[in-house]
Image: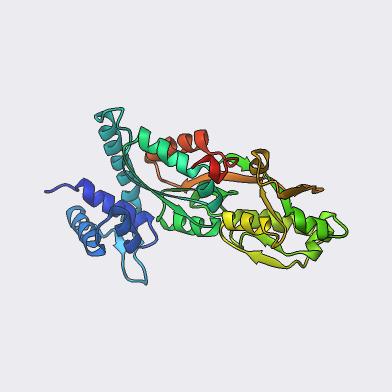
Amino acid sequence: MSSPTIKQLEAFYWAATCDNFATAAQRLHISVSSLSQRIHELEGILNHQLFDRGGHRAVLTEDGERLLGMANKVLEAVITLQTSFTNEHQGLNGRLKFGVGELSALTWLPKFIAIAQKQHPLLHLEPYVDVGAVLERKLDAGELDFAIMAGRSSKSSILSQSIIKADFVWMIAQPLLAQATPQDLKSLLSQHTLVTLPSGAGTTRILDDWLLSQNIHEVKRITCNNWSAVAGMIREGVGIGFLPKGWTNNGIDSTLIQLESNPPLPSLHYAFQWRRGDIRNIIPTMQVLVREHINFSLRPNDIL
């Protein structure tokens, strides 16, 4: 009697934990037909059906659920074995696809990639940038190994570990401020356009909470999913907006004036998020590395 192979167990693991077979095949960099073939071979070896394919999508059978826990342990043991016999200077290996927001991509991500590559030269990194709502959906579907997102996930399938907070301050171009009367923030928002990120971004939540606390229900907005473009539009006097506090501390363009806000915008807490049940040692390793090097106070000029 033949025994299951590691490739068959890997195919089963990803098929069982991803949203669909197509996503699982992408994670393994094989075709869907190859993935299905490996699972079919595994079912033949075990003489048990692992997926119920009767509906619109394949779902685990009771035997599949039972195998998933055992497959996790086997694959983790294989990873531990590989790591034990790998030169410690080579670090982790394989492919790692992770998600970050646009603010992360603009600040700490480039340095993080450089450091991660130096520590783990055999690890192929695939960063993916989007708003938090999209990252959460992709993480839940198994398209990402982990993500750095604002807030904690509401999904029971995703675990969150808080790692850092970001603070923001209101900014306005000096010429725009000189034209305004009166000059308190609430009045300025009634006179000028609000330049901000779109819905789905973590900053939108703290903005909406702040507007509600100030009893501001209607404001004209220009939304853009790029922080550099938002900062550029504020600098050009298109409207009012807010930027990471660290950017102002590091000497942002002198044409921008910081506006006093009472109360200030709430801090935005970021978390390292990964899928429940993912016991690969790559997850805690990356969690430690991210915590050590995440820094929203970096500006684009600081990383070039």
Residue 214: tell me if it is visible: no
Q: Is residue 240 left or right of residue 82?
A: right
**293 in relation to 168, above or below:** above
- Viewer-proximal residue among 258 and 155: 258
Please, which residue is most extreme toward the right here?
A: 182
In the figure, is residue 68 to the left or right of 208? Answer: left
Total of numbered circles in the picture? 0
The residue at the point 76 percent across, 64 percent down is: 192
Nearer the observer, 259 or 38: 259
Residue drawn at x 31%, y 28% as measured from the top left: 89
User: Looking at the picture, how far across and down is residue 83, in whole percent?
Assistant: 29, 32
Q: Is residue 23 left or right of residue 187?
A: left
Residue drawn at 43 percent across, 38 percent down: 286
Could you tell me residue 64's position as x and y percent?
A: 32, 55
Q: Residue at x 28, y 41 (%)?
A: 74
Q: Position of residue 16 (x, y in %)?
A: 35, 56
Q: Identify whether 284 is placed above or below 213.
A: above
* Residue at the extreme left of the image, as rendered: 1
Q: Is 156 displayed left or right of 8 in the figure?
A: right
Residue 137 in picture, x, y percent from top left: 48, 59
Q: Quick one: 32 or 45, which is closer to the camera?
A: 32
Quarter occupied by residue 88: top left
Q: Note whether 86 is above or below 35 in the view shown.
A: above
